[in-house]
Image: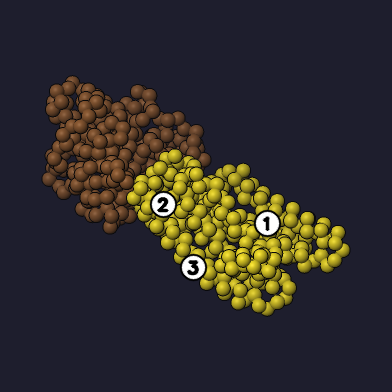
Chain colours: A brown, B yellow
Amino acid sequence: MRVSALMLPPVLTVRDLVKDFGSFRAVDGISFDLARGEVLGLLGPNGAGKTTVMNMLLGLVSPSSGSIRIFDKSLEKSRIAILRRMNFSSAYTSLPGNLLVRQNLMVFALMYGLSDCRRRVRETMERFGVTELAERTTGQLSAGESTRVNLCKAFLNDPELLLLDEPTASLDPDVVDKVRNLIRETQRESGTSIIYTSHNMQDIELVCDRVIFLHRGRLIRMGTPREIKESFDSATLEDVFIQIARSGDLKAEDGQ
Amino acid sequence: MKSVPFPAIAGVVLRYLYLYTRNGLRAFELFFWPLNSLLVWGFLTRYLSEGGGGNASMPVTFLLGGVLLWDVQFRAAQGVSVSFLEDVWTRNLLNVFVAPVRTWEVVAGFCAVGLLRVLVTVPVLSLVAYLAFRFNILDFNLWLIAFYGNLLLFGWAMGMLANAMVMRWGQAAEGLSWALPFLIQPFTAVYYTVETLPPLLRPVSLALPSTHVFEAMRFALAGDTRLGQGLGVAFLLNLIWLGLAGFTMDRVLRIAREKGLLTKVATQ
């Protein structure tokens, strides 16, 4: 991330975000910003509230209170205009397996209202090295190929903000390394801001500029991977993760 | 392809065009069930009528008309509900919901798929009905457009209600979503008149737009001129049903966003 990017208004501003599901508080008053071109890791044990935060950022779940502003617009009021400029990829969703890769990408190119869809699809496939997969059905792809095609869909509209939910889940280490490099290279070229969740701590250290640790719905640490490790006096983020997961109630950081 | 009007709707429709054109089994399924009903009902009615020794032509035409028109409503409803389920089954629903597509655009796309399914199956069914039973659907003349239009609208409303059920109750409601058109079939007087139903059920029957269409069809076949009024009532009822279905979907979507149900349905 360039230093100058920090002087620009943030792409995403989250303030005092709360989500209650009945009497259960899944997200408890978290606040953070995402700068232009920044890759922010969202970490935490299962049930920490990462997925709920991601879903609220996508407008799939409505917050109980607090605000989400993306591109300086309220997500609640300008959802469609915002979604045009962002994208999403998750290990837990897939493109329809009964269509060809090329067909799937064409469908989403139309849905994102892109002009000259064929050219855009062709260029994005070239960029992600999946041109040779164009005439194969998505259901026939290996996990690694499928991840590359999902990323291809995620970058179709040249998003300014991209949400990646465990993009390297269930991939072997070799493919994880390739996917990680692909994300980082593409991000550097395009300057896309990314929110990244993963349970792979090496992923987080290598891909993310900054990290947020969530625990029981609360934001307990925020900083660069190095700062986080230092604050916990740990050699690796994995140690930090284990400490947090086994710590019970940690004192929440105050907003920023 | 530089740019297309209503790109989001076009995207939804294109997804299903690809699906049906590249999979022969899916195309086969489009024709199999309606052809099956048409032939079974047609031959059964002919057999019973000939056995009875009476005037066979009127019951046969009533039933065949019922089969052909029922299929329009069923296909339209399925176009909306199965298109949605297709996205649930393939775990693609989240991708659609996080794309910049408004809910009405998704629904409009599904309705267009329903219309395309009808446009593909109706000519084939009509041809078979003519060749096998000398039933000429074109004898309805321009009334046919009013029949089809009303049944399409009600089918879409049914499909939207079915989708709302799946969004609210998840895949557990999938069976009900498939069954919804058949749930109303006994009450909507497809193959018999409203008077055949017990008096208690007649108001239920008359609240369904399709009942007025099937009654109008029988009037048309019997040369009765009262069919126009019934079709007008069907249209007004359709407006109410579509409004109700739209309201229900909107309400359910809001509840789904509050309770986090969208992601549950999409990743089940």
Residue type, numbered disc 2: Leu
Question: Which residue is pictured at 12% across the width and 45% down the height?
Answer: A7
Q: Nearer the viewer, mark 1 or mark 3?
A: 3
Which image quadrant for residue A142? top left
Residue type, numbered disc 1: Val
- Say whether residue B247 is visible: yes
Q: The C terminus of chain A lies in which quarter of the figure?
A: top left
- Same chain assignment for discs 1 and 2: no
- Same chain assignment for discs 1 and 3: yes
Report which residue position mark 3 lands on.
B240
Question: Which residue is pictured at 49% across the width and 57% down the height?
Answer: B160
Report which residue position mark 2 lands on.
A110
Q: Earlier in the sequence, mark 1 or mark 3?
A: 1
Measured Cα–Cα span from mark 1 to mark 2:
31 Å
> Which numbered tag is attached to residue B124?
1
Q: Position of residue A241 (x, y in %)?
A: 24, 27
